[in-house]
Amino acid sequence: ELCDRKDNDCDGLIDEDFDKDGDGYTTCGGDYNDNDASIYPGAIELCDRKDNDCDGLIDEDFDKDGDGYTTCGGDCNDNDVNVYPGATEQDDGKDNNCNGLIDENHSEPAALFDVSPETFQRSFLVMGGVLAFVFLIFFLRRMIKHNVPEFPKTPSRDNTEDLVILSLEKRTETEYRASLESLHRTIYPVGSTRPIEISPKVRSEIISRIEYTARLVTNYSNPERSVSLEKPAEELKKMGTVIYKNFVPRDFATKLVHHYLVLEVEDVRIPWELMYSDEFFALKYAISRRIKSDKTSEIQKSKRIKKKALIIADPTGTTPEAITECDYLKKILEHYFSVTYLRAEKAGKVDVMYHLSQGYDIIHYAGELKGESCLPVYGDVLSCGEIEKNLEGSPVIFINGCGSAKTFSYDIEGLAKVFLQKGALSFIGSLWRIHDRKAAEIAADFYRNCLYYSVGESLRLSRKKNYSSEDVTWAAFVMYGDPTLDLHGRNQFR
C-alpha cells in the first residue's frame, strides 16, 4: 500500500497504512504528524505547543500581542506586548515578567499623608462617581424585574429586550394558532394571536420529505452507502421555506428582528428550527424551544473556576462509532474542562447515578436510545425517576443518540423535560443518528463557545461554522431551555 490516494492492495481501503492516528488525514494528505489525532490540515488550533492545523505556525491563535509567548506558554497578559515571561520589569504598574509581582524593582516607600490638594480632589471625585454608579445599579435592579415566564431565575438574564417568543399552538389537524411576544419591561396582559389553517396533506408531505433527507444523511455517513446524496441542504431549504410561509403570519415576519428566539410548539414532528427566510432560523437566531410543565426548577450557579465535563460513550455497546466521537471530544475538552470519561462497562447504572450527583457543568451522552426507556446504561436502563433523584447542579445536557430502528426521533422532548425540570441549564438533542467526526466537531465547538457566550448563541455559532450544503449534520440538533443563559453566570450578549 502506497500513500497515493489509491487502493493499491485492493482491500477496499485507501492509504490505510498512512493514517496511524485515525484522524482521517494521511501523511501524503498534509498530516505532518500522523501519531497525533489532534494534528491534521484544517484542525482547530489549540494552545498546546503544536501546529494542529499544519499551517507551519504553532499556537498562532494564542499570541494576540505578537510577543512570541502564548497564554499556555506563561504570557499573563496576551494583549500587551510588554508583558511576557522574562521581560524586563518596568515602572508601569504591570507585572511585565509574569512572576506575580508588579514593579518589584521600582517600588519606593510611600510617604504617609503626603497628598496634594489636587490629588485629594481627584480622589474625592472618583470615589463619588463610584458610589453614584453603585447606587444606580442597585436602583435599576430593584426597579426592573427581568423574568421570562416559565424560565428559571438566573443571574444571566439581564438583556430580555433582545428576546422574542413565537408560539405555534396546534388546535386541530387543520388549525394552528400563532402568537408573538417580545419581552420588554412591560408585558401586556392581552396578547395578539393569528389563526393558521394548513392542509394535513401539506403537513404530512413536509415531514416525510425532511425525514427522507435525514435518511439520506444517515446513509451518507455509512461507508457502504448505495444512495447518492446531492446537496441535502437545498431540500431542507425548500421545506423550510414552505414551513415559514405557511406558519408565520406576514405581519409577524417583520417583527422577528430579535437575536434570541424562543419557540413554544406542540407539533414536535415539524423541525421548526429549519424554517427559512433568506437564512435558516437555526443559523440566523440563537434559537431554543420551551417546554410547558406544572413543575418549577431553579438554576444553580456554579462558582467553580475550572469547569467539569462528563462524557458517556456507547454504554449499550451497540454504537461503536459513538466511541470515536467521544474519544475526539475528550481530547478537545481536556484543554478547557476537567473531564470524566465513562466508556461501555464503566457506564453502569450505579456509576452513572453517582456521577449525575457530582454537579457537572456539562454532560455529553452518545449512544443508542430506546423509545420505551429513559436513558440506557451498561446492562440496564436509568429511569426518568432515577434521573430526577440523582441529578445535581445545573449542567448543559447534550444527548446524541436515536433509536437504531428509526431515523427520526420525536421522544427528545420527553427526555429534555426530565432534565430541565430538575434544573438543567439547557438540553440539546439530535433528531437523527449522527455519530461521526462532524457531530463531534459541532459539539466541541459548542462547548468551547459556552465559555464565552450564552448557550443559544454558542449553538448558533457552532452551526454556522460547520454549515455545509452537502453535510447537514448542523441541522440535526434541537435545543430546549432558555437560550440567553450563560455557563458562567456572566452577561455575554453579542
Image (cartoon, rainbow, N blue to C red):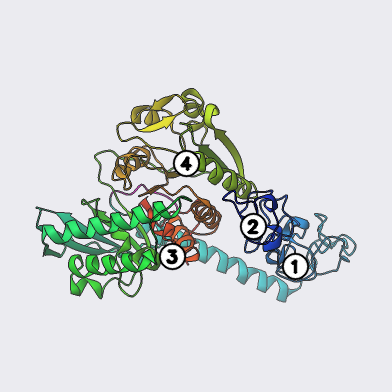
Disc on the earlier residue, 1 or 3: 1
Q: Position of residue 155 (x, y in %)?
A: 44, 52
Q: Between tags 2 and 4, which lies in front?
A: 2
Q: Between tags 1 and 2, which lies in front?
A: 2
Disc assigned to residue 147: none
Say which residue label 1 marks: 56
Badge 4 crowding class, 10 Å Cα cut-off, few under 14, some 14 to 19, many 20 or more, is many
Q: Is residue 360 left or right of residue 80?
A: left
Label 3 element class: loop
Is any part of residue 64 visible from this angle? yes
Disc on the earlier residue, 1 or 2: 2
The Cα–Cα distance between marks 2 and 4, rounded to whole angstroms, is 24 Å
Is any part of residue 488 visible from this angle? no
Say which residue label 2 marks: 25
Quarter where residue 374 is shown: top left
The Cα–Cα distance between marks 2 and 3, rounded to whole angstroms, is 20 Å
Disc assigned to residue 366: 4
Which residues are the magenta region? 150-155
Q: Position of residue 244 (x, y in %)?
A: 24, 68
The Cα–Cα distance between marks 1 and 2, rounded to whole angstroms, is 17 Å
Q: Between tags 1 and 3, which lies in front?
A: 3
Say which residue label 3 marks: 470
Q: Is residue 12 left or right of residue 284?
A: right
The answer to which of 195 and 104 lies nearer the viewer is: 195
